[in-house]
Image: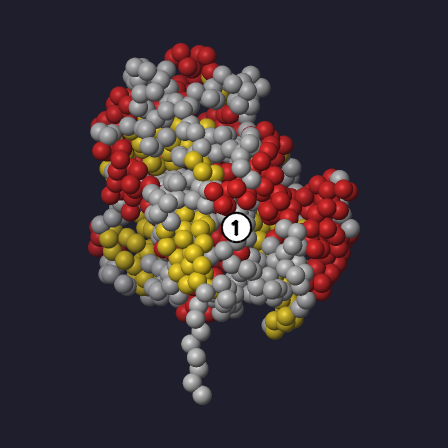
């Protein structure tokens, strides 16, 4: 018999990508009968991305329909995996959590959430509610690997961690990006699709766009590139601030009316001249002075609406030893030059709710015995191995990992974090695949993909308004989730029910959540969708159309009024006690005093040594896309090195090299390039899938985990923010023997 070809019933659905902060619009062709993606392409009508989307989004189908995807709750017995029911999974996990809490106290239970988990609006509410009900504050996340320094400094300067200023890139005439590569990685903490096109527009308007980076990044084609030695940005920024002040390029009126601490700031940066910073940064004094002059010219407005200047920094700086003091100096430069809260400078968005006030209670808490802070409730990931392996009462013995792979994403000196995770009495992974964490977990719970749930953009864009073009969008699910797959919020509600704890502090709310969880998944499907109800309420409470109207009338998004600035300074949105921006917060100034001169002396002594930095690649978002046949075709990552260094060391292109730090050693092939600053090596992140039993494609192309070279513990965590030191690591590199 000849098999008759099935005719597809194809429907085009409008959605948006949730892989990174850019959240670009997408059109998805779906075979509705087979519940499969046929094609994905950029949405030309999306109100902001306007037909742009990167390959991570347009090639998502390979990940969505991967044969490796976990589709049922799984339990590991020895080295064997067994499919179990949800009832069994919830019952057993809850019993083990209860046992650990009874034996060791609530702090025995910890949670780790990754960037992918941060893209889910509903999950955090229920996750936090469960952990608060159980009485544990052991919340870890990848934020302490890339961004938490910004939240700490915002809390000190503006009174709340969620006071996130973003550059008004579409109206500025001088833009400087330090340690970021928006063309590849999107933008940290704010929404900016089509970044290269928008930077090019600045140049067309007669402005300047400058990128400071130890590597000539992909985004550099849309502006000017200047090399800077890794982890020396604090000296450049201090000298930049000093030159602005010495040259009189400050807005005295705005400073006196809306800010405090200017004299202290001026005193602290006075020692840092363009010539002095050049000794360690590699940025010539005359170039710094030219940048200050260009910045000053752009900042001196005849009217409030004239063009301005904006400085922005990203992960490459955040991950250094001075990430917090760098961000303090950068925000201070934006403020004292008159660019804060002005068109063309940096702006504070207005989201659906005021995130500053809503998250005020989650700001800075000092509940760790080692003195390190928890910022926005997040514990430092660089202390996780210590927190598991120590013998102190209340050490972590049980952990739930949601949408993350900390064994690759976090500092893991010589595999110490692997040792810690393997020692846990309970390890649960909530994910799409059995990655490195899932492979050693006791249970793996299958989660929905972003195509299978209703959603609005990241909380930072939807709630905090961190978007260069303010807008709102809602997307219905594109696909039906597989029968035995559940959303994370449902899992937390079920666990709460099994543990007998009350969510949200009220029995009525807890009961409602449990009812949702019980009836949302039946033979009839989801007939009482909890997330949809909540998203609808959020929109309507903010005066926006509900989800039905958004889906029907605004599938490509709804533009909101442009942010004109002048809506922050002098208002109740400044959440410090005196309602003024603090240019000299005591903890940050103290950290600068304690470290700047010592770090400078160390840089002088070590300026001939090579430093390691990370690279994000366009086809990868952390480890989530590592198993995609459509994206990952190279067999390994490489150590990128300048031709000058390669010749001096005796390395040839493609040759294996041994890379050593004081924390670990790896072996990796090299690629020689003229895009690297001498005395710098760059290794792409999120490789090293050699231990996962559920990533068949990634296992064929494992690559090397550069975080094996990073340190952990108190000596390798920034005291202000709990950030891990993952960039600017001193290394030696030699031909492999």
* Residue placed most toward the observer, 687 or 104: 687
Q: Which of the image's four quarters has the C terminus? A: bottom left
User: Viewed as shown, does residue 405 lie left or right of 702?
Assistant: right
Q: Position of residue 34 (x, y in %)?
A: 50, 67
Q: Name the residue rendered at 44%, 62% in the picture.
A: 10
Q: Is residue 157 above or below residue 98?
A: above
Q: Position of residue 471 (x, y in %)?
A: 45, 36
Q: Name the residue rendered at 44%, 68% in the picture.
A: 8
* Residue placed most toward the observer, 591 or 557: 557
- Would you say residue 11 is visible in this rendering? yes
* Residue placed most toward the observer, 424 or 595: 424
Q: Position of residue 511 (x, y in %)?
A: 75, 46
Q: Residue furthest bottom?
A: 1
Q: Is residue 455 above or below residue 307?
A: below
Q: Secondary structure at mark 1?
A: loop
Q: Which residue is mark 1?
A: 476
Q: How crowded is the residue under tag 1: few (<14 C-alpha within 10 Å), some, or many (20+)?
A: many
Q: Name the residue rendered at 21%, 55% in the picture.
A: 647
- Would you say residue 404 is visible in this rendering? no
Snapshot quadrant of residue 541: top right
**Count of number-bearing discs:** 1
Q: Name the residue rendered at 50%, 46% in the picture.
A: 551
Q: Position of residue 279 (x, y in %)?
A: 28, 33
């Amino acid at each position: 018999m000849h098999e008759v070809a099935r005719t597809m019933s194809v429907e085009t659905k409008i959605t948006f990508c949730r892989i990174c902060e850019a959240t670009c619009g997408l059109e998805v062709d779906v075979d509705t009968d087979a519940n499969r993606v046929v094609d994905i392409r950029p949405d030309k009508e999306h109100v902001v991305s306007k037909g742009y989307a990167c390959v991570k989004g347009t090639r998502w189908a390979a990940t969505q329909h991967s044969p490796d995807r976990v589709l049922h709750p799984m339990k590991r017995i020895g080295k064997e995996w067994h499919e179990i029911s949800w009832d069994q999974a919830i019952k057993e996990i809850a019993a083990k959590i209860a046992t650990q809490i009874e034996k060791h106290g609530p702090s025995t239970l910890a949670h780790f959430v990754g960037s992918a988990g941060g893209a889910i609006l509903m999950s955090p509410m229920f996750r936090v509610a469960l952990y608060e009900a159980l009485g544990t504050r052991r919340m870890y996340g990848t934020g302490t690997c890339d961004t938490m320094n910004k939240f700490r400094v915002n809390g000190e300067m503006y009174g709340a961690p969620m006071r996130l200023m973003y550059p008004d890139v579409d109206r500025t005439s001088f833009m400087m990006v330090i340690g970021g590569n928006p063309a590849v990685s999107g933008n940290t903490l704010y929404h900016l699709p089509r970044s290269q096109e928008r930077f090019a527009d600045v140049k067309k308007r007669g402005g300047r766009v400058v990128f400071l980076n130890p590597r000539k990044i992909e985004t550099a084609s849309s502006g000017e590139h200047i090399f800077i030695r890794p982890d020396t940005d604090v000296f450049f920024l201090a000298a930049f601030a000093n030159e602005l002040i010495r040259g009189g390029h400050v807005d005295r009126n705005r400073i006196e009316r809306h800010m405090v601490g200017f004299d202290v700031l001026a005193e602290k940066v006075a020692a840092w001249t363009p010539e002095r910073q050049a000794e360690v940064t590699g940025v010539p004094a005359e170039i710094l002075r030219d940048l200050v002059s260009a910045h000053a010219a752009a900042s001196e407005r005849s009217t409030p609406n004239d063009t301005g200047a904006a400085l922005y920094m990203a992960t490459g700086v955040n991950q250094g030893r001075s990430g917090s003091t760098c961000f303090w100096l950068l925000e201070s430069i934006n403020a004292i030059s008159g660019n804060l809260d002005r068109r063309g400078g940096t702006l504070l968005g207005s989201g659906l709710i005021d995130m500053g006030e809503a998250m005020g209670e989650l700001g800075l808490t000092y509940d760790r015995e080692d003195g390190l802070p928890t910022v926005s409730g997040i514990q430092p990931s660089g202390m996780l191995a210590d927190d598991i392996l120590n013998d102190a009462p209340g050490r972590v013995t049980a952990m739930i990992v949601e949408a993350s792979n900390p064994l690759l994403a976090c500092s893991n000196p010589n595999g110490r974090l692997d040792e810690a995770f393997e020692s846990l009495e309970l390890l649960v992974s909530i994910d799409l695949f059995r990655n490195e964490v899932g492979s050693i977990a006791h249970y793996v719970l299958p989660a929905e993909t972003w195509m299978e749930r209703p959603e609005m953009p990241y909380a930072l864009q939807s709630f905090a308004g961190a978007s260069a073009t303010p807008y709102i969008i809602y997307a219905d699910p594109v696909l039906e989730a597989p029968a035995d797959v559940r959303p994370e919020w449902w899992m937390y509600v079920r666990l709460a029910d099994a543990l007998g704890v009350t969510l949200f502090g009220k029995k009525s709310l807890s009961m409602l959540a449990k009812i949702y969880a019980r009836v949302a998944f039946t033979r009839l499907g989801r007939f009482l969708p909890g997330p949809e109800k909540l998203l609808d309420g959020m929109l309507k409470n903010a005066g926006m159309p509900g989800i039905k109207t958004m889906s029907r009338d605004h599938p490509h998004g709804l533009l909101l009024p442009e942010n004109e600035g002048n809506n922050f300074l002098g208002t109740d949105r400044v959440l410090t006690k005196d309602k003024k921006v603090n240019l000299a917060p005591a903890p940050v100034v103290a950290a600068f005093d304690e470290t700047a001169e010592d770090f400078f002396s160390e840089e002088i002594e070590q300026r001939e040594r090579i430093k390691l930095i990370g690279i994000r690649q366009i086809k990868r978002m952390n480890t989530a896309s590592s198993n995609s046949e459509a994206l990952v075709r190279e067999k390994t990552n490489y150590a990128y090195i300048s031709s000058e260094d390669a010749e001096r060391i005796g390395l040839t292109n493609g040759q294996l090299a041994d890379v050593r730090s004081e924390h670990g050693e790896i072996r990796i092939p090299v690629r020689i390039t003229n895009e690297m600053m001498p005395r710098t090596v760059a290794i792409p992140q999120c490789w090293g899938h050699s231990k996962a039993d559920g990533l068949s494609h990634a296992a064929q192309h494992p690559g090397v985990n550069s975080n094996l070279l990073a340190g952990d513990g108190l000596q390798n965590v920034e005291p202000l923010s709990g950030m891990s030191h993952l960039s600017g690591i001193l290394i030696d590199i030699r031909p492999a023997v």
